[in-house]
Image (cartoon, rainbow, N blue to C red):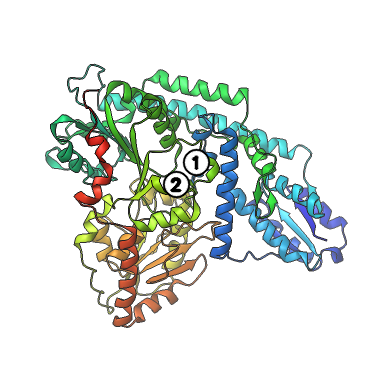
Amino acid sequence: MVSLLITYSRFRLQRHLLRTKKANFTNGCYVMLGDSFKEMEGLLKEYGLQPSQFRPLTIEQQDAILRDYVEALGRMGELNGQDIRWWATDIASKNRFTSPIPQLLHVLVRCLNAIKEMADDGQLLVLIDPPWPVVKALEKSAVRLNWDLRVISWPWSRFVVRLRGQAKTWISLVRELAVSIFRIFEAKRHFGRISSKMEDKRPVYLIKSFVYPNAFFDAGLYKDPFFGGLPQFLSRNLGEAANILTVVIGFEKRSDCYQKMRGVRDGRVVPLEVYLHWHDAMKGFIEIVWACLRKTFRVPDKVPFLGHDISSLLRETIASGGWRIPLFQYLHFAAAGRIAQMHTILACVLTYEGNPWERMFIKRLQTVREDLFIVGYQHAVIPQAAAGMFLSKREVACIPLPSLVLTTGSGPIAIMEKYGALPNERIKVACALRFDYLFNLEPMPRRDLQDTFVVLVVLEGVREVLPLVEYVLNTASTCGKVRFLIRAHPVLPFERLLTSIGGNAEIPSNIEVSQARSVQEDVSASDAVLYWGTTVALEALMLGRPVIHFDRGDLLSYDPLFELDAFKWRVSDGADLTNILDVIRDLPDEEYCTLQGRARRYVINYFRQADDHTMSQFLPSEVLRCDTRE
């Protein structure tokens, strides 16, 4: 029989250990799931308990986890899909950075694996500080599988955690209300207001995008960071009968970007916030509050996951504030309505990752005009962890979807078909609009190996990349004749990442922060590229450089190249990087070129070149034939 002890109280755990014979713990194991018990490891080992080792998951295990996860959220969507607010939640988006579910499932899988390891021995397994949703799932399995399970905690512990989670979610909602109102006024101050009586009455092809400071050039030139040359292609083919309207959201130096938009000469680039009023934010806030107070999202009676029922995990997550709705993304519903009210829209294209704002934007446009041609463009890579890109059959019938999903190449389609159930007729290959420059370049020659080996470290604009930063800081001092070149994301500069680690973090002398404007400059100055989940890894392979994936041990792979083995190595936290660098350094030129060619062919399959033919997918005949006088 499996014997489980779950504890949340250090005092009660210590008292339990002192009152129990050490022989009862011999050969037992523990799983440390929180940092607050670290100082008790010595006492646990003194009683004969050893830390349980979590074996890395195989790709087959990850595939099964992903499919069950997508199906579980499909069941939730089937039950709640008629409520538009469900599609605005982080949970429904399956966003790998904002949804609480993947982390909870990761903990659950760790616990289940440890239980499986101990099942044959019949020894005690101590689970220390697991999240309460995971405990509720384990309790349900314990009844069905006849496990001996005890929970040591204060009587009110679970309810305190619930209240804390709810408070955090409500405070976040209030904070987002203030931020949203500020952003609306900020955009109108720096860009100006949009008049409902505009002089240009031409219909518009609407592009919903994002903007960074490096998208602006001299003489009023602008290049969309996500759609590349698509606006110019649309303008050439639509002619004077229609206008190109790009509605964007800024990230870094937002006010500067919004000021520069006023001088853009080629087409119109407008901040999304100017289509909103402060009372839209208030109205959205009240709608969310009223809906959440009136009723909670429902959970099916049974939700299978790896042979267990996680309905109680989902129910406890929602009860603990996991229903979070990001207000500004929810406001895309109101913004889309006002855009449709002020402009005659021929068609719309937007980035497509499964985020809440996309579903709000699509739903509102479709309520204005049901047959409007809307393209969801898969502009970024699709790692296994990008579960928001995968839909179950249960979701397809009720989720707000674009008319067509266009991908960067045939590789992403194969991934989406493998893990999702989007109908074949709603997904097609287009082209890699952001990466047109790659196809004009030959692979860079291998650098002189007598020079210092340069590792380019490319970082995402999310705090989840911190383990990679810490790994580089800890590893650099042990790597002789190696220089680390850090390329941070503009949304999250390296200095801010260091602040998150601790402002006093010591930077080894062989670490340098890149000041280069383009990825190409940094890749050309390097011998290998170290990454976690960024698209730059594919760019590096296309430019002829080997890549090294930093594996954090995630439940689902964040590696955009998770299906590729050629010209790629893997390193995990605590592993010696120098061994991998020596292997790359010692590769014979002939083998180096062979692996380089295989990797480039994979990327070419992932990124299709943009030209008039491939971009024509964004402008089908029904749009060209559309009566622009409507």
Q: Nearer the viewer, residue 484 or 350?
A: 350
- Where is residue 447 shown, x and y percent of the image? 25, 74
**At 72% across and 66% down in the image, what residue appears?**
117
**Amino acid tagged 1:** Val
Q: Secondary structure at mark 2?
A: loop
**Is residue 197 visible in the rendered structure shown here?**
yes
* Percent position of residue 610, x then y: 23, 52
Mark 2 vs mark 1, CA separation in Å: 8 Å
Q: Residue furthest top?
A: 197
Side (left or right) of 150 relative to 585 = right
Please, what is the three-letter code of the amino acid marked with disc 2? Pro
Find residue 524 and report its image quarter: bottom left
Residue under the image location 34 percent in, 28 percent down: 273
- Mark closer to the chain start, 2 or 1: 1
Which sits in the foreground, 522 or 243? 243
Position of the N terminus, as image quadrant, is bottom right
Asked if residue 7 lies left or right of residue 624, the reply is: right
In the rendered structure, find residue 435 and report the number of the disc placed on it.
none
Q: Rate crowding at label 1 as few (under 14), some (14 to 19) or many (20 or more) other CA atoms within 10 Å.
A: some
Q: Is residue 321 above or below residue 457?
A: above
Q: How many marks?
A: 2
Q: Which mark is residue 396?
A: 1
Element at label 1: helix
Going 44% across and 42% down the picture, which residue do you hit? 354
Callout 2 crowding tier (Cα within 10 Å): few <14, some 14–19, many ≥20: few
CB-based contact (under 8 Å), mark 2 and mark 1? yes
Q: Quadrant of residue 566?
A: bottom left
Q: Nearer the viewer, residue 498 or 71?
A: 71
Image quadrant in which the C terminus is located: top left
Image position of 454 (left or right of 321): left
Q: Which residue is mark 2?
A: 423
